[in-house]
Amino acid sequence: MSSTEVGKEDAWNLPSLLPFKVRCRQAVCEVCRPWECSAGSLPVRGWAAEAPIKMVNTGMSPITVSLIMVAGVFLARWSIPAFIRGTSYVRNDVRQAPHLIIWAVLAGCMWAVANTMTIYAIRAVGLSIAFPLWNTNSLLGIFWGFLLFNELHQAGWKRWLGVLGGAAAMCGGATLLAFASSTQASPGKAALGVIAALGAGILWGTMYIPYRKAYLTGMNPLSFITFFTVGELATMTVLALSYRGAVPLWHEIVGARTVLFWLMLGGFVWVIGDLFQQYAAKYVGISRGVPLSNTNQLWGLLWGILVFHELQGGSQRVYAEVIGGSILMALGAVAIALSSATSREHSRWQDAAEREGKRYGIADGYVRASMEGREFEGGLSRRSFVDWLLVGGVTAIFVAVAAMARLPRFDLNLTWAAAVSAAMLFLLVGCGIALWRTTRFS
């Protein structure tokens, strides 16, 4: 039977290897998460992409630090997609689904507001209380995935138990780790701190609705993040100007020129890890991808304990909390990873994709190709002169700020730093190759 004779129902049936491919994508997207620090990591210590930021110990306002890091994020979100696929690929996605630009910008705005709320939450109630509160975004991601996008529909009680039990275990583990790594909470304004932390969790959990809506209707993650970061930078700029004022903000940035490189580098590295989260949201859904994304805290422990000596002289109770929390988070991640979508559940995802495609008038073939991880009309795009100009321009900016940078004096273990960095590079290369072979970054 030729491809043109295949009916609609058969056309939506994925190959018999689909469960294997889905598991491969899930493993690839989540194993490489050490490259990403949490969206709220600026006030939190020791996460992989925050390693450059960890070395910056100035009197800068947290809002200014966040703005500079987001500037690095902005540069990375435009240059990395241009290097991997080319900007013509972004134009093709926009032509097929122009409405998704608004969703991407909206998600970026929500991220910036939530990130700012975490700063005030930690100042008011401390990390040990704030982190578990905003970590409820995992449960909210499961809720939105089930309610809006047919995730976990017809999944069976074992997979429900795996996802919910795994998310609960990871929240418990995160709570123990937060207590172990926290300092004394700031007195006063406790109610406002709790509200800020819960608000950040709600915004981050809800932020994944635009993610999933975009990916179900065909947009490539590389295209999505280029518009997502417009919302990030615009909102963060407005917040910084409102909080600091234009002149004081400018003087603070100029005065911190020797550390600009490290802050922007932290944002750039964050984007590398975030790319894998984007593909996780596309191929394994937000009900699984969101909880699994919080395992980056385990890599933060490696940086904090082995490289930055954060728990030296700690009590037995602190070490017990660290070990217990790490085990709980690891077990929760394993439970969720083993609960990959079945073919029956995946058919419900396809129903949601069809619904979204009809709502916005998107070609059925475009939506189907995206769901199956293949190209739609024309195959791989070629990089143009504009792409190389963009990559070269971003490189020049980083070279310029690197020339002004000074290596801060910091007590760190270079041997462990090299070992953890080598492990991350190994995972990045291995998982990047596997994701390319499975999806061609589509």
Image: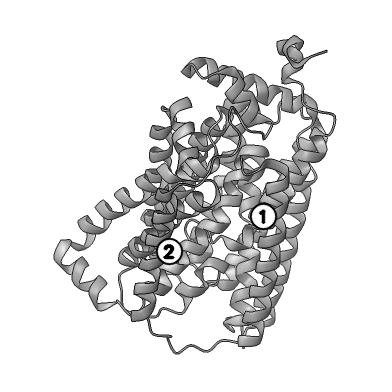
Query: In the picture shown, does residue 423 fall above or below 282?
Result: below
Is 258 on the left or on the right of 99, as rendered?
left
Q: Position of residue 23 (x, y in %)?
A: 77, 43
Task: Residue under label 2, please give it.
Answer: 122
- Percent x, y of residue 224: 48, 40
Q: Which of these two is toward me, 297 or 437?
A: 437
The amino acid beneath tag 1 is Gly
Which residue is found at the position 52% from the left and 89% from the top? 411
Pointer 2: residues within 10 angstroms few (<14), some, or many (20+)?
many
Q: Looking at the picture, tell me which residue is in the foreground, 108 or 180.
A: 108
Q: Quadrant of residue 36?
A: bottom right
Whole-number angstrom distance, CA of label 1 to CA of label 2: 34 Å
- Name the residue carrying label 1: 432
Q: Residues within 10 Å of mark 1 (few under 14, many from 20)?
A: some
Query: Is residue 44 among what the camera can see?
Result: yes
Residue 407 - label: none
Comparing marks 1 and 2, which lies closer to the viewer? Answer: 1
Can you give x and y, in whole percent of width and height, for residue 382 in the image? 53, 43
Image: 268 above or below 11: below
Helix, strand or loop at label 1? It is helix
Task: Relative to 33, say whether 101 is above or below.
Answer: above
Q: Where is the C terminus found, in terms of image quarters?
A: top right
Q: Residue 232: x, y in percent?
A: 37, 49
Instruction: Give the residue at the far front of this rendering.
Output: 385
Q: Earlier in the sequence, mark 1 or mark 2?
A: 2
Report the amino acid beneath label 2: Ile
Q: Quadrant of the N terminus?
A: top right
